Amino acid sequence: MLTNIRAWGNSQGLCIPRDMLNTLGMGARDRVEINVQDGGIFIRPYKPLDDKKQAAINLKSVRKKIADIDYREEMNSYLDERYLHE
């Protein structure tokens, strides 16, 4: 499909046809992720992590800042297995 970039105030945007949004089960005001990939723009529906996975990721980043403790590796593997793998 061919379309144009349009000006919206101080920004620019694309108008996405309704049938494309319906195919994705999306509508107005739904959030999307936008990335530059292989010389183009990649747009996909935003799917936030559930609370447990986000908590595990946050905890893992905090643990990296804590000095080495004997149980650290055991705790890492437990949380990885329980919350980061589906």
Image (cartoon, rainbow, N blue to C red):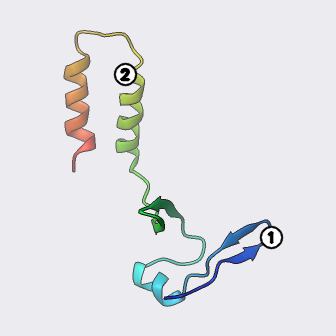
Q: Is residue 23 left or right of residue 82?
A: right
Per the image, label 1 sits on a secondary structure element best described as: loop
Residue receiving disc 1:
9
- The residue that appears at 41% across and 78% down in the rendered structure is 24
Q: Amino acid at mark 2?
A: Arg
Q: Residues within 10 Å of mark 1 (few under 14, many from 20)?
A: few
Q: Nearer the viewer, residue 56 or 34?
A: 34
Q: Is residue 11 left or right of residue 76?
A: right
x and y percentages locating residue 20 in the rendered image? 46, 85
Q: Residues within 10 Å of mark 2 (few under 14, many from 20)?
A: some
- The residue that appears at 60% across and 71% down in the rendered structure is 29
x and y percentages locating residue 86 in the rendered image? 21, 51
Per the image, label 2 sits on a secondary structure element best described as: helix
Q: Is residue 71 left or right of residue 63?
A: left
- The residue that appears at 63% across and 83% down in the rendered structure is 4
Q: Amino acid at mark 1?
A: Gly
x and y percentages locating residue 66 in the rendered image? 39, 14
Q: Earlier in the sequence, mark 1 or mark 2?
A: 1
Residue receiving disc 2:
63
